[in-house]
Amino acid sequence: MTIRILVVDDQELLRTAFRSLIDAEDDMEVVGEAAEGTQAVRLARSASPDVVVMDIRMPTMDGIEATRRITSSLGDRAPRILILTTFDLDEYVFEAMRAGASGFVLKSSPLDELLRAIRVVAGGEALLAPSVTRRLIAHFASQSQSPAKRRTDLDQLTEREREVLVLVAHGLSNGELAEALDVSVPTAKTHVSRILAKLGARDRAQLVVIAYESGLVEPG
């Protein structure tokens, strides 16, 4: 299956470079480009991309607001949002994940890392494995001034599922979950799937946000 991609960045040179890189892949195609968030929201609705590669800092409407509007308006039909950021500890990245993004990749990363990231989020996974992502989430969750949100749906989770949620919030992959819990990888995946369904979360990125915002996991 070909992954349909919308590229959103206010720098034309970067958009051109990303398009050339992506279109050279057999399993990917760029179905649209946008220079700012308003265009991105419109194209996300009309072009039906699977993944939106989204810059954060843009004129008119930034990537956070565009992400929020895309995920909220399209619901289950919303594409996965992959955030592009310049710095590994970018204060906007956690906000983008809270808005519905599935992960992020540094603009300074090798180009093949962008391709890998697109495939990861297109496959329904969150891009949370790198240690820098774990540091980023913990750092900016600790900077949040909002009190923990009471989520009654956490009461639906079994003791084992709450344990899994905590481990997911610390950035463990399915393989690492399986090892930590002494279960098979398919069993670990089943636990994660059940948690996603019970909490109404789109992917693992949203589980991380829920775990921190609810106070189930404390930064540090």
Image (cartoon, rainbow, N blue to C red):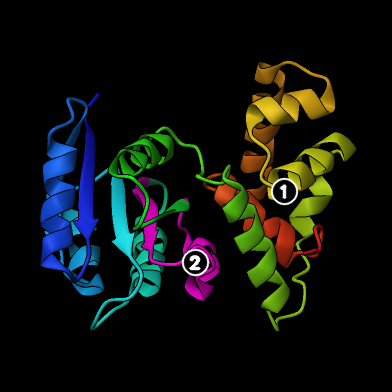
Q: Is residue 157 visible?
A: no
Q: Does residue 113 belong to the magenta stretch?
A: no
Please identify the quadrant where the N terminus is shown: top left
Tag 2 residue: 93
204 and 141: which one is in front? Answer: 141
Tag 1 residue: 170
Please identify the quadrant where the C terminus is shown: bottom right
175 and 209: which one is in front? Answer: 175
> Magenta segment range?
77-102
Residue 165 horizontal/vertical position (percent): 75, 44
Residue 3 horizontal/vertical position (percent): 25, 34
Residue 192 position by quadrant: top right
The kind of secondary structure element at disc 1 is loop
Q: Residue furthest right?
A: 159
Q: Residue at x 73, y 30 (%)?
A: 177
39 and 154: which one is in front? Answer: 39
- Name above or below for residue 18 compared with residue 136: above
How many angstroms separate mark 1 from mark 2 (CA)?
Answer: 16 Å
Q: Does residue 88 belong to the magenta stretch?
A: yes
**190 left or right, relative to 124:** right
